[in-house]
Amino acid sequence: MNVFFHLPSETGAQPLQIEVNRLVIAGWTGRDAHAIEHHIGELEAIGVPRPSAVPLFYRVASNQLTQADSVQVVGDGTSGEVEPFLFFHGGEFFVSIASDHTDRPLETHSVALSKQICPKPVARHAWRLAEVLNHWDTLVLRSWIEEDGESRLYQEGTLAALRPPADLLARFSAAGNPPPAEGFAMACGTVGAIGGIRPSASFRMELFDPRLGRSIVHAYRCQALPVIA
């Protein structure tokens, strides 16, 4: 799946194209056991069974990636989660953001299928990982949903809550996976939902860098297709 990014540079946005051929969704990536338990509890509240181990690494078809402003989903029970999005290109890692959009009713039967069935929106801008690695923990993840016609803060937290890239990639390799190569991409986990996980017709997400005073943002709307029995 080809995705296109703009990288900041002194001469303006620099275009970058990558063909993602291996997409991984990392789950349960928190550093704090209590925070992980909180997120597991959020999902248990909507019927999702506890994971067999933490973290877990789910393979998802790369053609599920999209940079569109609108996505189609089946039914009205899906929701997004903002996550750091690492990808490997030209011998180095870059970071952007993606939404691990998930079918919540299906998640009660199979987490892997619930992730596979939904598109994975990704932003159109990225940064070199080397530019933010030294202050990675200060980066802020946020998302907003639409409720009662208003935009409401849905998620907010720093990346200090999640395992850093090197740790996460080491655990990925230790689980028997081949090392990252050209076209590898990973969504790296999320922070808890404020007020609990719930669906929304729109989702807006941000990765904010307070040190360098910049953000990566993306928003999309969901079109719910009818569930035909």
Image: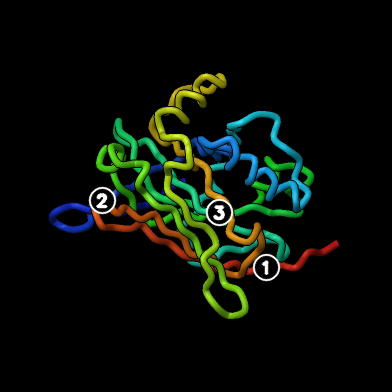
Specify few, some or many for label 1: CA neighbours under 10 Å numbering under 14, 14-19, or 20 or more: some
| Amino acid tagged 2 | Arg
Residue 75 tag number: none
Residue sitting nearer the eye, 178 or 141: 141
Determine contact: label 1, label 2, CB under 8 Å: no
Q: Position of residue 117 (x, y in %)?
A: 66, 50
Q: Residue at x 64, y 52 (%)?
A: 102
Residue that protrudes farthest toward the right in the picture: 229
Residue that label 3 marks? 81
Residue sitting nearer the eye, 180 or 17: 180
Residue that protrudes farthest toward the front in the picture: 34
**Can you tell which of label 3 and label 1 is closer to the viewer?**
3
> 20 above or below 212?
above
Residue that label 2 marks? 211
Disc nearer the start of the sequence (1/2): 2
Determine contact: label 3, label 1, CB under 8 Å: no
Q: Position of residue 33 (x, y in %)?
A: 58, 35
Residue that label 1 marks? 224
Q: Residue at x 48, y 51 (%)?
A: 98
